[in-house]
Image (cartoon, rainbow, N blue to C red):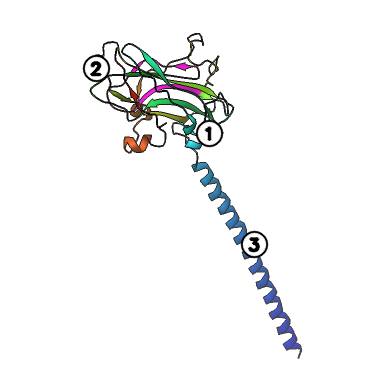
Amino acid sequence: MLNFCAKWVKIRRMDLNLSKRSIALRVSAVVFAGAALSTLSGFGAGSAHAAPGGNLPNDCRQFSQDGGTTWGSQNVVTWSADRPVPGGEVTHARFLVKNVCEEPAKLQVFLGNWSISGNGSANVRANAGAAKSVVVPMNGTPGKLVVETGRLTQNTPVAVELFIGIPASETRQGFTITPDWGIALEEVSGDAPVDPGDPDPGNPGNPGDGDGSSAGSLDLFGSLGGATGSLDSLLAAQTLQAPAVQAAGR
């Protein structure tokens, strides 16, 4: 009888030890799973952002056509139907843009898959914040960087102006100019120089608005350093869907 009781106590102790080990293993599994999920979650959140040199998602950009009272997508931009004449230029659009995301970025204005009908000729320029571009001919390959700002402070609006002109030597009339304007926010390092913005945002493009800086005309593919994929896929998410402009005669 005593031997039986001793065996029964030993078996119960083994059962308790096994139960404790089972509980410990379950706790360890839960802790490990939680850590793994946390790691994966952190990795996923980080991978959603662009690295310096890459473009931020489209929803990081907001546009305003009423001086910053209301903000929305690129669809709020209104376009002028004015027709440029040889030796002159027209303002194609004027609006505000801001970066609403935490990632620091500079704003870039470029020509996308542009085209000109009837062997005509045209040129463009743009102002963005404190940066004023030089005149950029619409020739060569599509995808030209027209102007870029310094680092934008989050939620701080910058004024953008887009111009289309025709060289004074042009004799053709009535041709169609399709600039395919595009805007991107390219991520930069957090210590990049901040763009001072337009000193007179209520009157963008005023020649008295300070010296600013000009990015000149740069090839978009060169600035991206070996971008892959077709031009259409590269620019489709960034285009402003600007309407074509008809050239006027003298």
Quarter-of-image position of residue 101: top right
Left of 103 or right of it: where is 237? left
Residue 192 visible to the viewer: no
> Would you name the residue on which mark 3 appears?
27
Secondary element under disc 3, as helix, strand or loop, is helix
Magenta stretch? 129-150
Could you give the CA–CA distance between mark 2 and mark 1, rounded to whole angstroms? 38 Å
Q: Is residue 34 magenta?
A: no
- Lower position in the chain sequence, tag 2 or tag 1: 1
Residue type at numbered disc 2: Arg
Looking at the rendered image, the quarter that the C terminus falls into is top left
Camera-nearest residue between 118 and 205: 118
Mark 2 closeness class: few <14, some 14–19, many ≥20 residues within 10 Å: some
Secondary element under disc 1, as helix, strand or loop, is loop
Mark 3 closeness class: few <14, some 14–19, many ≥20 residues within 10 Å: few
Could you give the CA–CA distance between mark 2 and mark 3, rounded to whole angstroms? 80 Å
Tag count: 3
